[in-house]
Image (spheres, rainbow, N blue to C red):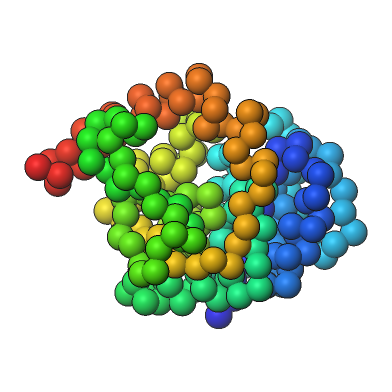
Amino acid sequence: MNISVVVLTHRRYRGLDTILKAWLSETPDVWLCDCGPGYKTSLPVNTVYIIPDCGSKARHAAALLTSGDFVIKADDDVMPLPGFVNDLHNGWVKSGSKGICGVIGRRFNGESYYKNTAFCASNKVNQIQKVDFVGVVTFSPREYLAFDLKGCQTPIEDLYWQMKVFPGVPKYVVPTKRYKNLESSSDSGCLFHNEKAREIREKFYREWYIKNYKKKAV
């Protein structure tokens, strides 16, 4: 079993080597997708420089360059702790050896992403949780990696992957406390606090919820 990791970064270079070292302690096949670009490291990681900056959707293109049977796509504001990759894989196996797993998830209960979804996180649950969307760190077999990125905007790249391309694939939040969310995960510059990005995300979610999920929820 080979597991690859793609870490996406956008000018968040402070402490990045520490994060990459932590991932290298979990698996030898680590890729850095640099949307800066400009980061240099002496660590044994594969670096993909994205010119021009294509935003967060670049992680999906970089994932196709890896060789792992499974690929973890990770934000640059999460620090893996010893045993994290093993927890993700074990969770995937326990969920039925199919689907996409992650450390945060949402269940869709209505047409508004911000008002009608229920949130859960890996470090707050004791059992595998079936959800409609997972993010921040995702664990996926290769069969769910390849798709056309046309129309995939940065604010909705994760929803685009899971709602538009693979709406029928099961998603799970797996229990683990072997990771740490860094302070940068909630700073003022993150997409969650960007009003324009929130509007784009809300509009996309509503369209695809009505198309693929609303009938199931009735």
Percent of width and height locating residue 6: 64, 56
For the image shown, how many numbered marks are present on the structure? Answer: 0
- Residue lying at 14% horizontally and 46% vertically, measured from the top left: 216
- Residue lying at 50% horizontally and 25% vertically, measured from the top left: 197
Residue that extends furthest to the right in the rendered view of this protein:
42
**In the visual, does 94 lie left or right of 10?**
left
In the rendered image, the vertical position of residue 139 relative to residue 33, given as above or below: below
Visible residue check, residue 93: yes
Percent of width and height locating residue 22: 73, 65
In the rendered image, the vertical position of residue 83 relative to residue 59, given as above or below: below
Displayed quadrant of residue 218: top left
Task: Looking at the picture, tell me which residue is in the foreground, 20 or 107.
Answer: 107
- Residue lying at 28% horizontally and 35% vertically, measured from the top left: 116
**In the visual, does 39 lie left or right of 175?**
right
Classify the position of the N terminus by image quarter. bottom right
Task: Looking at the picture, tell me which residue is in the foreground, 118 or 101.
Answer: 118
**In the visual, does 72 lie left or right of 80?**
left
- Residue lying at 90% horizontally and 59% vertically, measured from the top left: 42
Percent of width and height locating residue 146: 47, 53
Residue that extends furthest to the bottom in the rendered view of this protein:
1
Percent of width and height locating residue 207: 28, 29
Displayed quadrant of residue 9: top right
In the rendered image, the vertical position of residue 82 relative to residue 38, given as above or below: below
Residue that extends furthest to the left in the rendered view of this protein:
218
Displayed quadrant of residue 57: top right
Visible residue check, residue 102: no
